[in-house]
Image: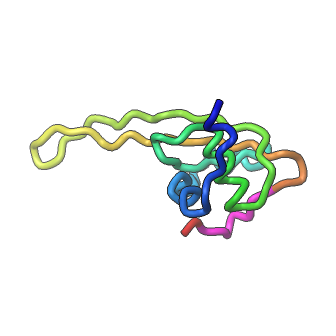
Amino acid sequence: MKNRKSQISMDQAYDIIKRPITTEKSTNLQQFNQYTFAVSKNSNSFEIKNAIQMIFKVKVSKVNTSILRGKGKTFKGQYGFRKDVKRAIITLEEGNTIDSSLEIK
């Protein structure tokens, strides 16, 4: 419970939130006030919530995370795996929106 009371700095917030994910599915979720971001693999939902609230100045009601395992691929005859990616689907409270033109540094 100690982690819940600690605040994160703006630099840590930008390290946690890597980039927005713009796919057809994530674009359709925006009509339900949900936004999708690629996030740091070692971050938890509470840190993600604080980072989004600090960066975009919005109120977050729910955070769902999932880790997408990297696919197996062959590259120049060598078999390897793509990197694992952690995604967070952020649900905002009514009246809050994230402008899609905003870029993460």
Q: Position of residue 79 (x, y in %)?
A: 16, 38
The correct choice, above or below, for 94 with respect to 66 in the image is below
Q: Colour scheme in the image?
A: rainbow
Outermost residue to the right: 95
Main secondary structure of the magenta stretch:
loop
The correct choice, above or below, for 50 with respect to 69 in the image is below
Give the residue drawn at x 62%, y 47%: 36
63 or 82, nearer to the observer: 63
Please give the range of residues in magenta: 97-103
Q: Is residue 56 magenta?
A: no
In the image, taking residue 68 as reference, residue 24 lies left or right, namely right
Q: Position of residue 27 (x, y in %)?
A: 67, 51
In the image, taking residue 76 as reference, residue 47 lies left or right, namely right
- Picture quadrant where residue 13 is located: bottom right
The correct choice, above or below, for 40 with respect to 97 in the image is above
Give the residue drawn at x 58%, y 65%: 104
Q: Position of residue 105 (x, y in %)?
A: 54, 69
Number of numbered discs overlaid on the protein picture: 0
The correct choice, above or below, for 19 with respect to 25 in the image is below
Outermost residue to the front: 2
29 or 54, nearer to the observer: 54
Give the residue drawn at x 69%, y 64%: 100
Outermost residue to the left: 77
Q: Position of residue 29 (x, y in %)?
A: 71, 44
In the image, taking residue 25 as reference, residue 61 lies left or right, namely right
- Picture quadrant where residue 20 is located: bottom right
Quarter of the N terminus within the rendering: top right
Give the residue drawn at x 64%, y 53%: 51
